[in-house]
């Protein structure tokens, strides 16, 4: 199956490229980059040296393919989607342009109306654990925000089962530096970014909209109070979620619900040990893997439950999730090309 | 003035030693360490090389002094306090043994009753910004928990002025590795600790008790939901506090209250810029300084206020605060020996 | 093919376990650990969670297998090798006990005579790029020192072709923290190890012996001046080698020799670009991969050549090289189970 | 005494500013920055918040002062030096423009002839440990290259006393990220720079010229083979120097020579312990201090001596050394304003 990538010089595009090169059912078609057209892909992604002699091409030269991965900055793919749909049978858009179903949400969270609201109906929010069936027949499969994915997968069982008070959910995500993309900036300059513990979006984080959309069950949308802090790490997110339980549930009840929802999911692991260094979910050991690890701890002195979820923002938070969605859509084994377990130590 | 240190081989003791060596009013007396007695202090604290030829002594050989700094593990100083009081006019106890005023809190948060509840009344919770007057006449000045100090200084103006809903305060602190002390362990082993974003106390953190004690105003004790995450950093804490405002206050109103409380404080800085990398408080640039930086952001879409506070856990969170309290108690300039501004970059 | 591991709780043993779990020709037999017998392997290696339910067993319960990986501290396997050979057809010993061919080298570099010099003749120094044929028929395949492997692969073409002055070779290796093993120590304690640039073996590094042994050609053994510095990194080694050329060779001549030796090697990449961040070999992007990247720069003002070589000390420097050797010995495709390309960024 | 700074928005300029603010004999005059003129200095150097309300001015508005610190990119100060000399009694130029005494060295190492060779004679290479007397009467005091300073101070006693073979000195410096300056670039982008162990100048490093100039004794210039590697650290340099001794000197002989040269120097510490984590010089604990730590180890099996030297590139490698030189030139206590001991841990 021929798969191409639009926007292959960024981190999510490069990670898609690495995964697709190793996917047994995929023949890699083209990889586009306007600024690097004509250069070897390994000149930008040095891990691919000696593995491929592919060169970047301009998106103007895009040829037909079966699946097209799109990894462009926000605002680009909404305009070019018709073009992409004319080239590919399915589009997997890792960007933010088609994630929100309600057109009214775009001006609110992204500052401008959607360029093609008519296409929103063709898009499926592409987390297989949420929308596996819909993904199979969708033409546009959206990636999900990496922070949103972490939070949603952490909290889904609670809201799906109506266990949590929807009026106050406080979420603090800690994120690594690759989340801000491949472009250098003053705040990513190593002497300034090294060992930073830096609030960068204490309020009004855009991913809040996705979280609230996907955690809406029975018509009830939880109020999510979101904050984001950048920490010293390259790949990885830890979401710490403070939820207040409706009833006085014990840990074993909550455990049962998570087991029910996630026990059969190949990429979701419930992490809840009594001892050991890694007894809660932790992004460090997930680099390169497609796992989302989820755990929780019951606050004995109150009705609070602290839910922790961790993943690699470029894998389950972007490219890995995209490949998983492609596997679902194309009828492949869901884990194909995503078998890497992560490293210990790293 | 002669000052000695009990427990000088750990991080808080070593930092006290460094500060007192540079203090113009202090003559350093003795520094005790049972395991290192007879060794040069610079064999343990290599930054002191060529600065002092002092050697550790056993606490059995402790001589009279005017001020005694105590930096011992929890549970040690409560038993030995009478001995310390017989040797020194004032004791500055950086440990946890005298921080809580209510004896009933010790079994609850520390798992065992207090050994000398009769002495609790002589102790003052030693944050000068809170108890400056009481410190002047106290014989026991307690250090404050580093996470507690960060949180209390972040939230104090709000609760003192009755602006925040006391029923739900969610606090997530991100802490560096020196907080866990100088003793190596499996979880501090570099391959396991490097780039960690690790939940280590999602609920029931002991410092919760101090925070609730010190933020009690008008008889009202706020309910604080505390969580702690270890991040890649050696020195430093960032507390992110989610509070819900009683009234629909604007940022400028909140700003005014913080200015009123902290404008004249030498070690408190209100950090609230519109632009720049360091527009919110950040521990990275505070290493070695005694500042506590405090900032906040009003959530436009709700009644939430996100308060951020940062400090160096070994300075304003331990030894620096102790020296500041000593300065207050002894009638010195409050900033004496604490002028270091921190480094940029670091 | 059934493969077992002795000493599976350390880093090299754990990495062997991860690789063998993913190897299509291997059925994992037993994994031993005396201190963890009875525990799940994922309690020690959390990346293996949900992938295997295997538990550690005691080495006393070792059953027959076709290949046995041994990852024990120095001095252990030399005594137990007869036992291992009675259990397995082939032993791949990642430790140091059988690397040196001359029994006289053991007292000199390891401080004690070899316990079983009679078995040294059955051992092959297990770097396939050096001894591919001999590995095929060997019963004992030794791992190679990680620093030694890096240095040898960096310098081999020069000494094999007699291009370098053997009288003065200065090598400085920079190594990550996982090289020191899984056991916590004062020097690995995060506050002390973080951001360290620490000389730990300025002279008399044991791996010197291996380097000199393997770079001996035509009876001439180069004099290698070795130093090692620990740097902030978990996995990875960079060896910077200063060699002095016999003749006034141009870069293109040297390039030709490296191409001739390494052009067909699946795990050796010659890295030598004019521009770009990654224009020289660098361990950062090799984590988890089995590549050894080699490059060089001709000093225009002298006869010096600076050779740089990089690898992941747990992969090409230990477990990955062991699996590669197993593939060679067993007639499998040499890259089987070792296809992971490394991550960018990481 | 009034002191001003030209180029105050970079790292060396900012560090000069911090030090001069705390210097008891200095009144800070102006701090220039063309791009930041009109902004508070603490908007660029956040550690200075609440300490000063000074704003950057344009260099066009420079007023007379007694000492002028210049921290400009290479090539700028050579042209503007006459202007600086007309404004200030003494100029301390932290840049590279006046470090080399021979005009012929500029085209060779910096690619262009010197703009004002007539002024070179007025400049003194400003390391007080080397040229204390000459600094007292100089109008231009140059800073020294940070890598050069480390190497020179490491090797000086050996070459001054004629102990080392001048024909082959191999030096490998490991440097932190602040050395490359305050401007963001692709190679300083955190995801690419974090945990890097990156060769960036394997040969032809410009500081070689300074090292060779300053280690020339008795007309004999040593041949220095220099390489530089970037490692994960913000501030700090470790130079590992491999020298070959002329005679078979024992460690105690070498020790005696270093003691003789450095025993009375306030900022030079000989670090040579038998045990302990910090038994060799290490930059980690020097951040913010003006120390240069020097140590060595005799290679028992050869005539090699490995010399290690470490410092903070922004302190003893730039601004701290400049303040020390100012103290010498102005007749102040040499350590004034430079008393900070560095932090442990950090």
Image: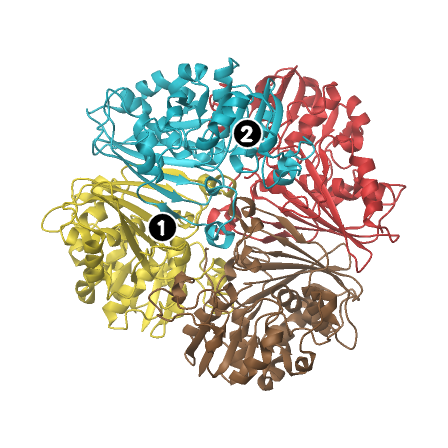
Chain colours: A yellow, B cyan, C brown, D red
Residue linked to disc 1: A237
Q: Are marks 1 and 2 in contact (CB under 8 Å)?
A: no
Quarter of the image where one finds residue B160: top left
Closer to us: D103 or D306: D306
Closer to us: C182 or A211: C182
Q: Residue furthest left?
A: A218
Above-or-below relation of C84 to D322: below
Q: Which mark is residue B16?
A: 2
Residues at marks 1 and 2 on the same chain: no
Q: Quadrant of the N terminus of chain C?
A: bottom left
**Left or right of A249: which side holds A238?**
right
Q: Residues within 10 Å of mark 2 (few under 14, many from 20)?
A: many
Looking at the image, can residue C174 be seen?
Answer: yes
Q: Position of residue C215 (x, y in %)?
A: 71, 71
Distance of label 1 from label 2 (alpha carbons) = 36 Å
Chain hosting mark 1: A
Q: Position of residue A295 (x, y in %)?
A: 29, 54
Q: Position of residue D61 (x, y in %)?
A: 57, 18
Q: Secondary structure at mark 2?
A: helix
Query: Residue sitting at 87 percent across and 42 percent down?
Result: D161
Q: Residue furthest right?
A: D218
**Left or right of A81: which side holds C49?**
right
Closer to us: D140 or C339: C339
Q: Secondary structure at mark 1?
A: strand
Query: Residue sitting at 54 percent across and 70 percent down?
Result: C71
Above-or-below relation of C306 to B33: below
């Amino acid at each position: 199956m021929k798969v191409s990538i639009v926007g292959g010089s960024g981190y999510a595009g490069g990670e898609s490229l690495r995964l697709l090169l190793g996917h047994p059912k995929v023949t890699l078609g083209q990889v586009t980059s306007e600024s690097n057209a004509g250069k070897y892909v390994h000149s930008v992604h040095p891990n691919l040296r000696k593995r491929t002699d592919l060169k970047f091409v301009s998106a103007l030269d895009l040829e037909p393919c079966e699946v097209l991965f799109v990894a462009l900055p926000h605002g680009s793919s909404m305009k070019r989607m018709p073009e992409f749909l004319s080239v590919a049978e399915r589009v997997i858009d890792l960007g933010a342009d088609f994630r929100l179903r309600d057109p009214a949400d775009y001006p609110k969270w992204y500052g401008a109306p959607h360029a093609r609201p008519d296409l929103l109906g063709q898009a499926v929010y592409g987390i297989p654990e949420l929308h596996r069936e819909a993904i199979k027949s969708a033409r546009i499969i959206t990636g999900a925000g990496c922070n949103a994915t972490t939070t949603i997968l952490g909290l889904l069982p609670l809201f799906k089962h109506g266990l949590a008070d929807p009026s106050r959910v406080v979420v603090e995500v800690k994120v690594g530096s690759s989340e801000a993309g491949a472009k250098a900036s003053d705040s990513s300059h190593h002497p300034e970014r090294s060992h930073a513990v830096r609030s960068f979006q204490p309020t009004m984080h855009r991913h809040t909209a996705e979280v609230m959309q996907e955690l809406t069950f029975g018509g009830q949308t939880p109020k999510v109070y979101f904050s984001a802090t950048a920490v010293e790490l390259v790949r990885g997110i830890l979401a710490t979620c403070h939820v207040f339980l409706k009833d006085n549930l014990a840990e074993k009840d909550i455990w049962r619900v998570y087991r029910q929802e996630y026990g059969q999911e190949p990429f979701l692991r419930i992490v809840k040990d009594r001892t050991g260094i890694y007894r809660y979910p932790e992004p460090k050991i997930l680099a390169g893997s497609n796992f989302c690890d989820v755990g929780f701890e019951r606050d004995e002195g109150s009705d609070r439950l602290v839910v922790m979820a961790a993943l690699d923002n470029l894998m389950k938070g972007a490219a890995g999730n995209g490949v998983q969605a492609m596997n679902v859509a194309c009828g492949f084994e869901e884990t194909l090309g995503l078998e890497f377990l992560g490293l210990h130590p790293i």
